[in-house]
Amino acid sequence: MSIVITGANGQLGSLIIEQLLQKVSADQIVACVRHPEQAIAYQKQGIEVRYCDYDQPESLEQAFTGASKLLLISSSNPNDTIRLRQHAHVIEAAKQSKVEHLLYTSFAFLGVGSIAPSHLHLATEHAILTTGIPHTFLRNALYTDFVGVLGLDTALTSGELSIYPGDWQFNTVTRSDLAKGTAAVLTESGHEHQSYELTAPRPWTFHDLVIVLSELAGKPVSLRQDPQIHNWIYGYLRKIDTSSTSADLEKLIGGPVTSLKESIQPFITAQYQ
């Protein structure tokens, strides 16, 4: 079995490879990267590194040769037109390389929200379906990372978290949990022609967040709704489905997802860890 990972130098890709190494030998993993010189650590572990650039179609077919399973990690380009073209290059190369199983990191509960990336992911999924290659769609929820723009350190110091008014609920997950779930799919059989909604099994709210912040601060942290807040994140959150949940991720990883308290700790200063 040869498992080929695109975007292997990225945050999610590197975590997936870390999990794969706990399940299969290094010589079964191929790390596809734009900058091979930055993947020397993989080579030292016995992982084959191949040059792979979504914008260079000629690099892709050779990179995917012999792939039993190919994981297409969605492009991070900010322009959706470019992203879709890049994805099309990968899909066509997968077809030409006779990849046996194509997996794609999509977005959770597509079609429920109205943000443009939903259309990008739906288009990519459709393109994959038209190839006839056995597929798996890994529909990842919003990363819990978004809390990094909420001013958590200020809330811990002041004892108050200010948010824009609304009935906010979040199905967010950590990259680490997504990596565990993805590694499970990549190393197990029976996942062909499946779509998984990789979200938390239960949503959390800002009230839950201030409870956790209070525990970390060792003092009460209250919640204040302020309609005068100008933060781009709230406009983004309103356009996607942040509340629908699924048990798919916990089933794949065989246990609970990371707790909210542990998930937010990377985004606060060390004194509150």
Image (tube, rainbow, N blue to C red):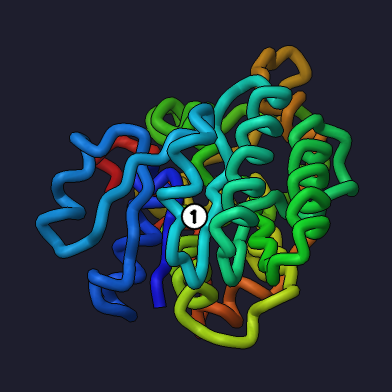
- Position in image of residue 33 (x %, y %): 35, 41
Q: Is residue 51 visible?
A: yes
Question: Is the N terminus in the top left, top right, bottom left or bottom right quadrant?
Answer: bottom left
In front: 88, or 169?
88
Number of labels in the image equals 1
Q: Which residue is mark 1?
A: 174
Q: Residues within 10 Å of mark 1 (few under 14, many from 20)?
A: many
The residue positioned 16% from the left and 64% from the top of the image is 46
Q: Quadrant of residue 189?
A: bottom right
In front: 85, or 181?
85
Q: Eyeballing the image, is 42 above or below 21?
A: above
Q: Eyeballing the image, is 56 above or below 104?
A: above
Q: Eyeballing the image, is 51 above or below 231?
A: below
- Position in image of residue 99 (x %, y %): 56, 64
In front: 193, or 181?
193
The residue positioned 35% from the left and 70% from the top of the image is 20
- Position in image of residue 208 (x %, y %): 61, 54
> Amino acid under label 1?
Thr
Q: Quadrant of residue 16?
A: bottom left
Q: Is residue 243 visible?
A: no
The residue positioned 57% from the left and 26% from the top of the image is 77
- Position in image of residue 209 (x %, y %): 56, 49
Relative to residue 38, is residue 262 drawn left or right?
right
Relative to residue 202, is residue 48 drawn left or right?
left
Relative to residue 30, is residue 191 drawn left or right?
right
**What secondary structure is marked by label 1?**
loop
The residue positioned 86% from the left and 41% from the top of the image is 113
